[in-house]
Amino acid sequence: MKYQHEPCDAGKHSAYPTLVFMALRLLRQHEIGKASEEEIPEFLVERFELDPEEVERVVEKVLESNDDIIAIAIASPS
């Protein structure tokens, strides 16, 4: 998680912190979290071959499922 704010890192496992970077910014666009309000760089969208409209639809579905996600988290053993 050390590199979640460095999306340009080209290390062996750079996809993981890059995806966290993107997820934090997507949530911030919906006023969730404290990540930077900067846009996700286009090269990252291209790197993962993402369709921005589809990404937004998925984020909306997750946000709509917020209550269910919280219930699952509460019910899950630590």
Image: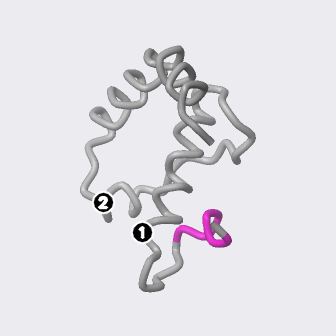
Looking at the rendered structure, the kind of residue marked 2 is Phe
Q: Residue furthest right?
A: 34
Residue 58 place in picture, x, y as percent: 34, 30
**Which quadrant would the N terminus be assigned to in this image?**
bottom right
**Which quadrant would the C terminus be assigned to in this image?**
top right
Q: Which mark is residue 48?
A: 2
Q: Residue at x 47, y 17 (%)?
A: 68
Residue 74 place in picture, x, y as percent: 60, 26
On the rendered structure, is 47 left or right of 37? left
Q: Which mark is residue 60?
A: none
Do the residues bearing badges 2 and 1 touch, measured as CB atoms within 8 Å? yes
Q: CA distance from mark 2 to mark 1?
A: 9 Å
Q: How dense is the environment of label 1, judged by Cα within 10 Å: few (below 14), some, or many (20 and up)?
A: some
Q: Which mark is residue 15?
A: 1
**Between 1 and 43, which is closer to the camera in this rendering?**
1
Res 75 quadrant in image: top right
Q: How dense is the environment of label 2, judged by Cα within 10 Å: few (below 14), some, or many (20 and up)?
A: few
**Between 42 and 48, which is closer to the camera in this rendering?**
48
Provide the major secondary structure of the magenta segment.
loop
Looking at the rendered structure, the kind of residue marked 1 is Ala
Question: Does 26 appear in magenta?
Answer: no
Res 77 quadrant in image: top right
Range of magenta residues: 2-7
Q: If you read the primary sequence from the N terminus, does the residue marked by circle 2 or circle 1 appear first?
A: 1
- In the displayed structure, would residue 32 be above or below residue 65? below
